[in-house]
Amino acid sequence: MHHSFHAFIRHNRESDLSLSQVNSLFWLYHHSYGSVNDLAEHLGVTKAAVSQLLDSLLEAELVVRSENPEDRRMKLIALTDKGRCLVRKSMKPGMPG
C-alpha cells in the first residue's frame, strides 16, 4: 500500500469517512474520474453499495456525479476542489499522525 494512502487513512481516522470512502477519494484522486462500475470493481463491492457510499461524499461536496457525454446512461464520478484539497492536505509530509 502506498505511504500516502496510509497518511490519508491516519488523517481521516477521526472524521466521519469510512475506509471505503477514503479509498474511493484516493482512487478518484489518482484516476481523475471514473464510473460507478469502475469504483465498484476497485473496491470489490456491488454498484448499489458504491452508490450508497457515494451519497455521503456527494452530500459533503467531496465528489460530483455527472452524465457521461458519450453514454448518458452512465454516470461519472469526480472529486470536487474540496475533495482534491482534502486528499492533498492528507498527503503532506510532516502531517501529524
Image (spheres, grey):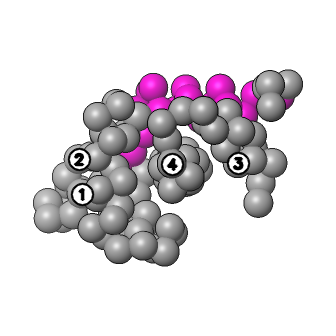
The residue pinned by badge 4 equals: 18
Structural crowding at the residue carrying mark 4, measured as other residues with C-alpha within 10 Å and reported as few (<14), some (14–19) or many (≥20): some
Q: Disc 4 and disc 1: Cα gap in Å?
A: 22 Å
What is the quadrant of the C terminus in the image? Answer: top right
**Dots 3, 1 in contact, CB < 8 A:** no
18 vs 35, left or right, is right
Q: Check residue 66 in the rendering and tell me which mark sits there, or answer none.
A: 2
Q: Amino acid at mark 3?
A: Phe
Q: Looking at the picture, does residue 42 appear above or below residue 58?
A: below
Structural crowding at the residue carrying mark 1, measured as other residues with C-alpha within 10 Å and reported as few (<14), some (14–19) or many (≥20): some
What is the quadrant of the N terminus in the image? Answer: bottom right
**Which of pointers 4 and 1 indicates the residue nearer the eye?**
4
The residue pinned by badge 3 equals: 5
Q: Disc 2 and disc 1: Cα gap in Å?
A: 5 Å
Where in the figure is residue 12, as x and y percent of width and height? Answer: 61, 36
Q: Earlier in the sequence, mark 2 or mark 4?
A: 4
Q: Check residue 75 in the rendering and tell me which mark sits there, or answer none.
A: 1
Q: Secondary structure at mark 3?
A: helix
**Dots 2, 1 in contact, CB < 8 A:** yes
